[in-house]
Image (cartoon, rainbow, N blue to C red):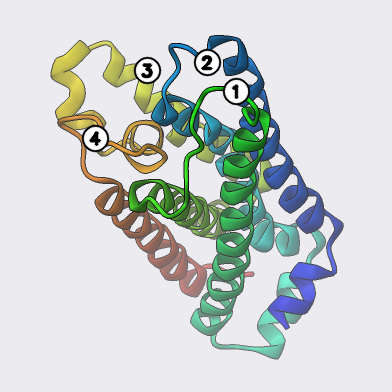
Amino acid sequence: MEWIKLRSVRSTWWLAIASVVAMAAAGAGVGLGYRSHAPVATVAQIFNNSLAGAILAQLLLGALGVLMVTGEYGTGMIRSTLAAVPRRRTVLAAKALVGGAAALTVGLAASFAGYLAGQLAIRGTAIPAASLGDWAILRAVLLTGAYLGATALIGVGLGTLLRHSGAAIGTLFALVFVPIFVVGLFGESGIAIGRFMPLLMLLNAVAVTTPTPGLFSGGVSVLLMCGYAAVAVLLGGVLLRRRDA
């Protein structure tokens, strides 16, 4: 039932397409920008920057997760859903499973699109290609896709907690961007706290071949994002059981 609802809503397709396009456009833009810097640009620089579209894609897929829940509250369909399936934890689990799987699929597609667009844009220059046969390259692409999927699950949790699209998406935006500015005020001493911040993890540990010293590794950062998602969904589940529809 959740899969039918998800794929029958136009916003799902628009957000999914926009995520892939954003990653591909960023990758192509980075590649084209580096064509004139071929003598000094490195493979790692171009590859790392080609995945920068994940900054926008995480918000788009996070919004997708939010709308899986708040869309039903906005239309009143949540009452029909809970009447059909009285076990509310089952409803939320289904939404998290379907939304997470769909977002992971789209996230991986978007990540590979960013990588491929960047490599195609520099084709014909003196810069060597970044091969997926290199584990560091493949790992960063896969982890970026997994990070995006986890962000969607955080959206599901926030949507369940707040039950309002604007409030939940705004909160997601704040959680992604505001902490990084706060950490920036402390300079290098803020790295101990900053390594727990989603955007810093994405830009300096997940979507890069070599994580920044002092940060968690890309794999640990994605696991931490999954932990954030689990907490958000679990808290949402607690309130879903205690509140009226």
Given this view, does label 3 or label 4 mark the residue nearer the observer?
4
**Vertical arrangement, residue 121 with respect to residue 209, above or below:** above
Residue, x 71% and y 71% (percent of image)?
78
Which circle marks residue 195 in the picture? 4
- At x 83%, y 63%, the residue is 9
Determine the CA span between mark 3 and mark 4. 13 Å
* Residue tagged 3: 181
Q: What residue type is labelled 3?
A: Phe
Q: Choose the circle earlier in sequence order: 2 or 4.
A: 2
Q: From mark 2 to mark 4, how far is it between C-alphas?
A: 32 Å
Mark 4 element type: loop
* Disc on the earlier residue, 2 or 1: 2
First along the sequence among labels 3 and 2: 2
Q: Where is residue 237 in the image (x, y as percent from the top left)?
A: 45, 70
Q: Label for residue 38? A: 2
| Mark whose residue sits in front, 3 or 2 | 2
- Binning the other alpha carbons within 10 Å of mark 1 as few (below 14), some (14 to 19) or many (20 upward) gives some
Q: How far apart are marks 1 and 4 (CA)?
A: 36 Å
Q: Which of marks 2 and 4 is in front?
A: 2
Q: Which x, y percent locates residue 214? A: 15, 31
